Image: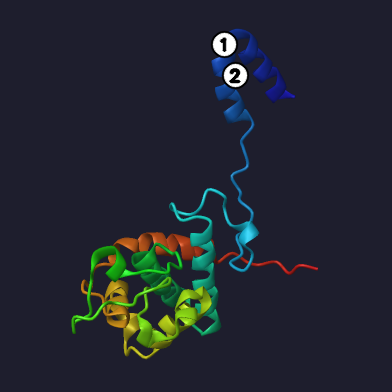
Amino acid sequence: MRRTRLLRRILIGAGAASAVVALAVLVPLSTAQAPVCASEPATFPAAGVEGWEGEQLENAATIVLTARGLGFGRDGQVVGVMAAMGESSLRAIEYGDWETAGVTNPDGSRTTSIGLFQQQEWWGSAEERLDPASSAALFFDRLARLPGWEDMEPSHAIHRVQVNTDPEHYARFQEDAEAVVDALSGACTPTD
């Protein structure tokens, strides 16, 4: 009742612009967001997370779920999402460094990089490398075999797995990857 009287006084005495400000103060909008569940893309924020949205969030969720299924905690999930951000902007692309920049392997042969992690043919079949879950599993299999990866800078661990030319290449994606992983770590409610 007090709010109504106060609002009425503001509306009458101060004009419409003040009324909008008063409404924002007196009637706080709910800032609570529905929980995001990695296995339910319908729960992903429409505005995205740190600029990553749609297909990119779906691919990040696949990386997170694959990592969880293989026993990797948050740090491993962040490393996987960082790697895919740095390699493909979280898109399962059908081309790689040779096609875009003429990059060759150390022996001078064309690179055959494709998929989320831009994995070359020795990683697996084209189908595996283009499938987000399979390519994530290939990445995490190699990460698991890297002794002490948990104690390395995340970008350096990724560099050791991906054999990228720049060990710092992935560092710029760490904050975004952490935000995306954290956003996708909401509690999933069982559906009936």
Where does residue 111 sit, x and y in percent of width and height? 29, 77
Residue behind mark 1: 14
Where does residue 91 sit, x and y in percent of width and height? 45, 64
Where does residue 74 sit, x and y in percent of width and height? 46, 73
Q: Is residue 129 placed above or below 180 in the rendered structure?
A: below
122 or 89, which lies in front? 122
74 or 110, which lies in front? 110
The quadrant of the image that shows the C terminus is: bottom right
Q: Earlier in the sequence, mark 2 or mark 1?
A: 1
Q: Are marks 2 and 1 in contact (CB under 8 Å)?
A: yes
Mark 1: which secondary structure? helix
Q: Is residue 39 placed above or below 10 in the rendered structure?
A: below
Residue occupying image coordinates x 18% and y 84%: 107
- What amino acid type should be assigned to the residue bearing mark 2? Ala
- Quarter assignment of residue 151: bottom left
- What amino acid type should be assigned to the residue bearing mark 1? Ala
150 or 97, which lies in front? 97
How far apart marks 2 and 1 lie (CA) works out to 7 Å
For residue 19, the mark is 2
Residue occupying image coordinates x 66% and y 19%: 7
